[in-house]
Image (cartoon, coloured by chain):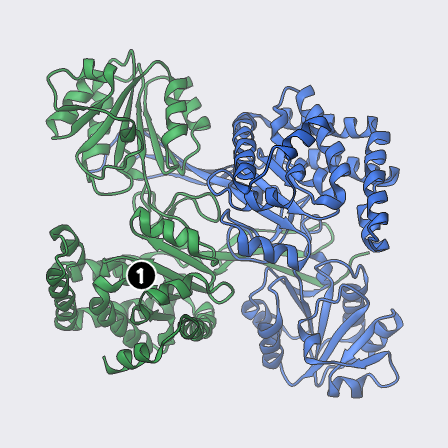
Chain colours: A green, B blue
């Protein structure tokens, strides 16, 4: 506490904060150099040590979190936010079991992406190597601290973490324990550093640390992500905004369509791969069954005029223009009737955030067109949109789901936290 | 001409320019949708048509270029720049033969990056798809117009090209001919659009068109690239700055070291993969031979004190601190003597731009350490640094050489102009 207070008190200008961030980034770079050479076994031992240290220090974690919760309550934070912030014994179990899963994942570092021996005898390999120094900016969820620290460690990267003021005490305890665990296996503690004590100016300096920080990952709501995208000179990967569409084609029978669509909307509503808009082909055989299924599951249907006809007697409200671009993250869905697959594709092009879109159909030609013409991170045929998830797609843990096209698109696992390096080996080869 | 003049005259404010760029980007997006569905054969026919149209319109190309050259001369442009700007019959031959090479390259679109059937029966594929709308900002080299248009077309992307005022007339003729050729095979001419008529405000608006333009590639000198990186909200890929290092290890014999090092420095001096600094191990057997070889090839040696001892009687000047970070792009090289591989690695970490570094050695352990510890786009053992090149590494034509870690690192060929898309196919799969 004393140290943090002194640091903060000593910083009167943004330039000073930028200098502190630069110094932290330099220490992270040195740690990253060690980490880049660490083999999987060493990194896995560090992950085990972190899990054990968290397990052995539950009282300190829960006490630190208690201080955040208390301050939150005093500041009038909503119950929903307090719940996201809360760490209890069960949630610490969750952190530990995530770390155990992570330990079981293969190490992406050194994986050969492509390679060949050229006609002139040059041996080529393009291999995966760590990115180096990664920054993360997120809000109010202390579990992200452990998730991102673990993923960065396993992929050979050092991280600078900005977890936000609401979770400052929790993150301080967690980062302290992670650093202790790293040290216990001989890895540099500066692999994981927090910057919360530098406040908002620290976050701004992190965004501007181009050349010092290789990649910045914002994780949180739309406002946070947009602020980072607009202000950062460090390369950013956008994650998470999902205005996810379902298209119910004419040919899909009830027994196929109802479970998929109800699952996509209601399995977990607060996540980015939950469905938010349902487009119904005007001749869809399963239209009424699907709307009844959603209604029975407690979903409020925001219907356009033609959908209102189909949904008579169900839980509906009239849709407004805003509904088509709303990510409800709740038991609500926008519903429109469209004349054709083309009309559905047009609607999706206009409103999609490029996360996930799904078609439910029994028509091969339509499924092929949907696959080809939808330009989103994931295109799904006859399955729930909830499958756009690193764990479900076999990538293991994920840093987030990228909705942009550069570097990584869709769920970002360990491999997506690497870059590549060409290795060229010759025997005196020159160009003539 | 009239149209361009009217457009320019009608634009009094940056907002208006931004609106024109947005409208062009929207047209590019529509073209990109058609192009994303075009098969290889169709795209290759377009490439053939472009080559034939350029061939049939040599007088117009050379006349347009003549107007640029004349204006350049009037403005006192240097002979070196005028030479880069010049298009004569032989250079048009070069453009046509590049297009023919491009036609022979495989289409990256649809290539499967990874895929599997999950235990639950979900079929997964992650495939390469076009990025969409790509912007390019470059200077004074009209050949880049044809190169980038061709690469974008083959990889299924639409482009907005800002070639700069010096080559405005040349680029206008070339872009007009490319559009004509696209139309002749039924592809949308808006696949390739120029924005030179909007001047510098057009370039600024292009950099700010996030969401409309998916990727911006600056190609040119350090100042151009830095200006784009600092001002763009559109994702940027940095290319081309190469402060390339050679490390001559103790164990390398003359017959291995001299040809490689002389080739790396002198084969072509004006390119980013030419060597700029030579680090010599204090016990290097080949030290004198290498320095004599460089000197005989006309290279001026910028030597530190210990290198001066080795280079007595040769063409030397004393090195200053600046030399270690200078990209000469000429018959100059900085030379330092180091005590060890570690000292060489430290020097490279401090001064490298992350493009290419090479070791010349006969020591296996040292070559392995160099490969592991150097963090650059390409690490080369016992071969010339001139091999860091899309053509030489078997990627075919390249858009540039990325010196950053996100998305693409090293030579960027057709595949690097794509993003990916997950395709998930089920039979009613839901999450429980």
Q: What residue is at 74 percent from the left and 53 percent from the top?
A: A120
Residue B233 vs residue B262: left or right? left
Residue sitting at the far top: A283
Residue B365 visible? The answer is no
Quadrant of the frame with the C terminus of chain A: bottom right
Q: What residue is at 27 percent from the left and 14 percent from the top?
A: A284
Q: Quadrant of residue A308?
A: top left
Q: Determine the chain carrying the residue at label 1.
A: A
Residue B123 visible? The answer is yes
Residue A258 vs residue A398: left or right? left
Q: Quadrant of residue B248?
A: bottom right
- Of residues B233 and A121, the one nearer the viewer is B233
Q: Position of residue B375 (x, y in %)?
A: 55, 66
User: How many numbered dots are placed on residues in this image?
Assistant: 1
Q: Position of residue B264 (x, y in %)?
A: 76, 64
Residue B123 vs residue A294: left or right? right
State the SS at label 1. helix
- Of residues B88 and B252, the one nearer the viewer is B88
Quadrant of the frame with the N terminus of chain A: bottom left
- Of residues B79 and A328, the one nearer the viewer is B79
In this rendering, the answer to whether B242 lies above or below A190 is: above
- Of residues A49 and A242, the one nearer the viewer is A242
Q: What residue is at 20 percent from the left and 69 percent from the top?
A: A169
Q: Residues within 10 Å of mark 1 (few under 14, many from 20)?
A: many
Q: Position of residue A118 (x, y in %)?
A: 69, 51
In this rendering, the answer to whether B406 lies above or below B158 is: below
In this rendering, the answer to whether A78 lies above or below B107 is: below
Residue on which disc 1 sits:
A103
């Amino acid at each position: 506490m004393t140290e943090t207070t002194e640091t903060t008190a000593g910083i009167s200008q943004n330039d000073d904060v930028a200098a502190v961030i630069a110094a932290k980034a330099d220490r992270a770079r040195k740690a990253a150099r060690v980490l880049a050479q660490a083999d999987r076994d060493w990194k896995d031992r560090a992950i085990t040590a972190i899990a054990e240290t968290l397990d052995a220090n539950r009282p300190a974690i829960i006490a630190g979190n208690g201080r955040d919760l208390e301050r939150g309550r005093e500041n009038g934070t909503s119950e929903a936010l307090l719940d996201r912030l809360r760490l209890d014994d069960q949630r610490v179990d969750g952190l530990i079991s995530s770390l155990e899963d992570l330990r079981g994942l293969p190490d992406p570092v050194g994986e050969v992406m492509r390679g060949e021996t050229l006609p002139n005898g040059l041996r080529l390999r393009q291999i995966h190597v760590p990115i180096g120094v990664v920054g993360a900016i997120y809000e109010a969820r202390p579990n992200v601290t452990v998730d991102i620290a673990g993923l960065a460690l396993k992929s050979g990267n050092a991280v600078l973490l900005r977890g936000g003021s609401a979770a400052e005490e929790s993150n301080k305890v967690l980062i302290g324990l992670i650093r202790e665990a790293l040290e216990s296996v001989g890895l540099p503690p500066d692999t994981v550093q927090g910057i919360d004590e530098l406040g908002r100016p620290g976050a701004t300096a992190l965004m501007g640390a181009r050349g010092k920080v290789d990649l910045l990952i914002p994780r949180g709501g739309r406002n946070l992500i947009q602020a980072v995208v607009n202000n950062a000179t460090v390369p950013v990967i956008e994650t998470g905004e999902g205005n996810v569409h379902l298209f119910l084609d004419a040919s899909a029978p009830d027994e196929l369509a109802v479970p998929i669509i109800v699952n996509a909307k209601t399995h977990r509503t607060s996540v980015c791969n939950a469905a938010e808009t349902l487009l119904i082909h005007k001749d869809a055989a399963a239209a009424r069954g699907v709307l009844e299924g959603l209604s029975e599951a407690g979903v409020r249907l925001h219907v356009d005029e033609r959908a209102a006809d189909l949904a008579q007697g169900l839980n509906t409200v009239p849709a407004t223009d805003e509904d088509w671009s709303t990510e409800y993250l709740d038991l609500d869905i926008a519903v429109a009737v469209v004349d054709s697959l083309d009309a559905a594709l047009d609607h999706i092009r206009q409103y999609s955030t490029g996360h996930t879109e799904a078609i439910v159909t029994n028509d091969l030609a339509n499924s092929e067109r949907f696959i080809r013409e939808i330009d989103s991170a994931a295109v799904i045929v006859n399955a729930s949109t909830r499958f756009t998830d690193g764990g479900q797609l076999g990538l293991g843990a994920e840093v987030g789901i990228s909705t942009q096209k550069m570097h990584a698109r869709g769920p970002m696992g360990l491999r997506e936290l690497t870059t590549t390096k060409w290795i060229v080996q010759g025997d005196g080869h020159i160009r003539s």
